[in-house]
Amino acid sequence: TNKLTGKIALVTGASRGIGAAIAKRLAAEGAAVAITYSSSPDRAEAVVKEIESAGGKAIAIQADAADAEAVKRSVNDTVKQLGGLDILVNNAGIAVMAPLDQFSLADYDRLMAINVRGVFVASQEAANHMKEGGRIITIGSTNAERMPFAGGGVYAASKAAVAGLTKGLARDLGPRGITVNNIQPGPVDTELNPADGPFAESLKGLMALPRYGTGDEIASFVAYLAGPESAYITGASLLIDGGFAA
Ligand code: NDP
């Protein structure tokens, strides 16, 4: 497994959860990896150490996805410190679920700033540095396709927004041989959505495969889309959700 040897990747929000699994997998495939985090420097450093002790190369950069200047700086620091940028994985994201009459505008703005605006800014800046064969991969959600409970409308809207953004960006960057895709996971066992959490049983009841996915399963799909074999896939939103949306 060395299909990404010589490639340079940036994974946003990778101090834990799905992002950390993606960063480790891309490094195991041979890529040099930069990760961002907003408030967990120790955990980001632990991910870097784990990659290094497995023989890989990694750096951690503090950058709040809601802060456009910080996001741009993280892209440029990656290019400076690692020598370029071939693969951007827009993973940083938050979920706020609340009843309609209690959903604050502050929460709406923060969720959209991280889940949508941050993806746009990182993609725009990364595209300035990518060459032919570049890859932009966003972690959306199956909730863009199916939102089967109350309180999740804004989260679903943010993930539907990146599905649309993916289609448009694929048109912008296709002529340069850069692909843009959106992976839409179902429930994945992380601190955001623990497999033993209060919603787990009801979520499993909605799925064709009644179990949570793992970060490693999502990372495997990302590694495929980041690699040379996926060159004909672009503008696509691809479900990896245990049949949640089926
Ligand atoms: P976690 O909450 O477990 O991890 C989130 C990661 O993102 C952390 O490393 C966190 O670091 C970082 N992060 C959070 N906010 C910011 C920010 N403002 N700027 C930069 N980094 C940030 O989440 P998951 O791993 O579960 O989710 C990752 C992505 O996958 C999200 O986009 C989510 O919407 C999506 N997803 C998750 C599913 C699930 O069931 N888990 C299902 C479908 C999609 P720090 O603590 O330093 O902020």
Image (tube, rainbow, N blue to C red):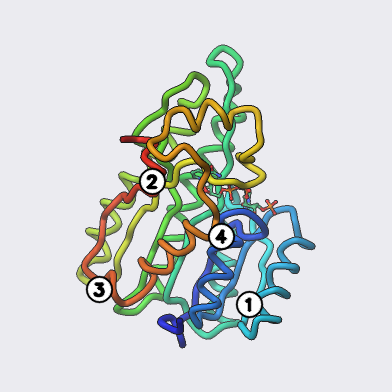
Where does residue 113 sit, x and y in percent of width and height?
A: 53, 42
Q: Nearer the viewer, residue 211 or 193?
A: 211
Residues at discs 1 and 3 in contact (Cβ within 8 Å): no
Q: Is residue 211 left or right of residue 232?
A: right
Residues at discs 4 and 2 in contact (Cβ within 8 Å): no
Q: Helix, strand or loop at disc 4?
A: loop
Residue assigned mark 4: 12
Badge 4 residue CB within 8 Å of ligand 1? yes
Q: Amino acid at mark 4?
A: Thr
Badge 3 residue CB within 8 Å of ligand 1? no
Q: CA distance from mark 1 to mark 3?
A: 26 Å
Q: Is residue 167 above or below residue 47?
A: above
Residues at discs 3 and 4 in contact (Cβ within 8 Å): no
Instruction: State the quadrant of the C terminus.
Output: top left
Q: Residues within 10 Å of mark 2 (few under 14, many from 20)?
A: many
Q: Amino acid at mark 3?
A: Gly
Q: Residues within 10 Å of mark 1 (few under 14, many from 20)?
A: many
Residue assigned mark 3: 177
Where does residue 218 sit, x and y in percent of width and height?
A: 47, 56
Q: CA distance from mark 3 to mark 2?
A: 20 Å
Residue assigned mark 2: 162
Q: CA distance from mark 2 to mark 1?
A: 27 Å
Residue under the image location 66 percent in, 37 percent down: 196
Q: CA distance from mark 4 to mark 2?
A: 15 Å
In the picture, the disc for residue 58 is 1
- Answer with mark 3 or mark 2, whichever residue precedes in sequence: 2
